[in-house]
Amino acid sequence: MLFTYNLALGISCIVALAVVLSLTRRRVYPLPLPPGPRPLPFLGNALQLDTKRPWLTYTAWGKTYGKIIHSCVLGIDLIVINSETIARELLDKRSANYSSRPATPTNKLSGLDFNTAFLPYGETLRQHRKIFHQVLRAEVSLSYHELYSRHANELVINLLGATSDSLQQCVQAYTASLIMTVTYGHLARGHEFFTRVQEITEIGTKILSPEKVAMFITFPFLAKLPFWCFGGAFSQMGRCRELCQQLLNEPFNEVKAQMANGTASHSLVADFLSQAHDDADEDTMKSVALMGSIGGIDTTASALQTFLLAMVLYPDVQARARAEIDQAVGHDKIPCLDDRASLPYLDAILREVLRWYPVGPLGVPHVTSNDDVYGGHFIPKGAIVMVNQWALSRDEDIFPDASRFDPSRHLAVDGKLKDPFVNNFAFGHGRRICPGRWFAENSMWTAVAAILAVLRIDHAKDSNGDKIEVKLEFTTGLAT
């Protein structure tokens, strides 16, 4: 115990000394940085952040300093964008400079460096996105319509027997089974695969927070220390790395064995193994397959849980959506993607779900490849750039009464949708826009349509038959 205490004290002294040495070197820029809060000596703005909900801090700062702000954490420049217009100007129109990701030492330490979302811009990323495009682009995603409907019908059946405590498991089972079927086909140990994915996600939530990542970026020598030196979440990085290796290899090898004995079903991995590839090897395919599963399960499930919550809190919206379904499709049929064009209010509900409580309030951070200037302010090379989706969702100029769930805000006067769904800021920007956005929207739309066509979503009742009030509360993590 004394050794551990002395080691921790020594590390603290080294860190403190490194902070002093690294942050007292003042940098001179040709133009002022974007406005922002005054940093504290050495630590920057680290102690001023709500570490569990930093997007709320950035939104509050935006009201004081403007739509684009500068802050710093341990000497790392952070540029936070609180405007959709600015996000599109920089990340879309200047995408060559804003398409890479920060070097994140914790990714490699925890075995998460296969993750497409965190790859720096380069050849490996292009290989990943090419494979994703082949199986998840718009027209291919539509071809899965029977698969969406089959799994959505199973979801409805499961929800019929669910309690308020098991709703989350039902929704996660829908997204997991759907994505895993497309990626790997039918796995003998699918439940075990999903359980491991959940464990990886839980560990990643703890070790990938911005302040923890910043600590390892600023002090790279920390990566050379054994995990147990840090305690807490960091001690789980070894377990995370072990899980990643299992999930990269085991399901892939199972599909390979199914191919050999002729029992493999159609899937992304089976298609890959059945064809010759000059531009991608098995390790790349393993990474893409696992990333597709990890990246899609929690995000889609989180959005669907938000939908269920909104339907309880806004029964008028639920009633209008059901009336639209009854009029356009009828009482004796569950809507499918062929009916989508005649159900614009249903699409408006999905847009509002993603706006009302964004799944990833800060998205995935970008990093500048070169110096840039915007609005007379200097954005230095190597700055981490984040789009504050929460601030975008609460822009009263675009979304009046923004805290209210109101799908009609996405409809024009003639009742048609205002904007294409895939342009929603929830899917990111520029060259790093989510490659699975069409698959995600199709799977969400099909689930929402089936639920509204069959079920009436209402408050749970207590033992006396009285309505149990619902509190509008969200947990935080990699997805809200």
Image (spheres, rainbow, N blue to C red):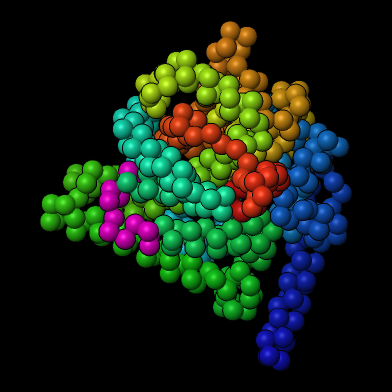
x and y, in percent, of residue 343 in the image: 48, 19
Quadrant occupied by the N terminus: bottom right
Q: Is residue 137 above or below residue 54?
A: above
Q: To which quarter of the image does residue 470 belong? A: top right
Magenta segment: 182-193
Query: Most extreme residue toward the front, as rendered?
Result: 464
x and y, in percent, of residue 73 in the image: 74, 55
Q: Is residue 9 above or below residue 113?
A: below
> Which of the two residues, 55 or 470, is positioned nearer the viewer here?
470
Query: Most extreme residue toward the left, as rendered?
Result: 261
One can see residue 144 in this view: no
One can see residue 177 in this view: yes
x and y, in percent, of residue 87 in the image: 65, 32
x and y, in percent, of residue 192 in the image: 38, 62
Residue sitting at 22 percent across and 46 percent down?
Answer: 265
Q: Is residue 424 left or right of residue 400?
A: left
Residue sitting at 56 percent across and 43 percent down?
Answer: 305
Residue 13 lies within the magenta run: no
Q: To which quarter of the image does residue 350 belong? A: top right
